[in-house]
Amino acid sequence: MELLNNIAKLHTTELGAVRIRRNLSLDCADVVEWCRDRISAPEAVTERRGKNWYVTVNGCIITVNAYSYTIITAHKLRKEKENEHKKI
């Protein structure tokens, strides 16, 4: 899969890292590495819609630009969305 083949290209901006930490209540130094680990997980569900990849894993969704491999944001799934993704 294209996103996994280019996992080393993943990066984010400083503001993106702040946003991801805040949205997911993370307390880790390297947000990009945290996202790489989640995206590479066997249980991760990846979907490309338009210009972005959406990776659903461990109750969160990570949004990555498909052209630049910039991690745009990540947030916790709402309960009804989480249940919807489990049915797929």
Image: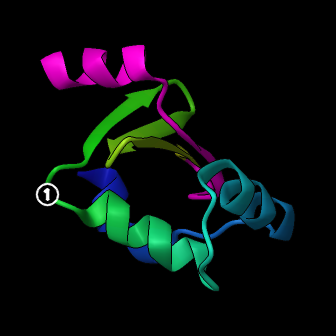
Residue 47 lies within the magenta run: no
Question: Which amino acid lies under the numbered mark 1 shown in the image of this protein?
Answer: Pro
| Residue 88 in sight | no
Callout 1: few (<14), some (14-19), or many (20+) C-alpha neighbours within 10 Å? few
Name the residue nearer the viewer: 22 or 47.
22
Name the residue nearer the viewer: 67 or 12.
12
How many marks on residues?
1
Residue 76 lies within the magenta run: yes
Image location (x, y in percent) of residue 60: 44, 43
Region in magenta: 67-88
Height in image: 24 above or below 5? above
Q: Which residue is mark 1?
A: 42
| Residue 75 in sight | yes
Taking 9 as reference, is 2 left or right? Answer: left
Instruction: Name the residue furthest right.
Output: 15
- Name the quadrant containing residue 28: bottom right
Q: How is the image coloured?
A: rainbow
Residue at horizontal 23%, vertical 51%?
1
Residue at horizontal 47%, vertical 31%?
77
Taking 56 as reference, is 42 left or right? Answer: left
Image location (x, y in percent) of residue 9: 51, 72
Residue at horizontal 60%, vertical 73%?
31
Instruction: Name the residue furthest bottom.
Output: 29
Screen quadrant of the C terminus: top left
Image location (x, y in percent) of residue 87: 15, 16
Taking 64 as reference, is 37 left or right? Answer: left
Image location (x, y in percent) of residue 74: 59, 47
For label 1, the SS is loop
Residue at horizontal 40%, vertical 31%?
48
Height in image: 63 above or below 35? above
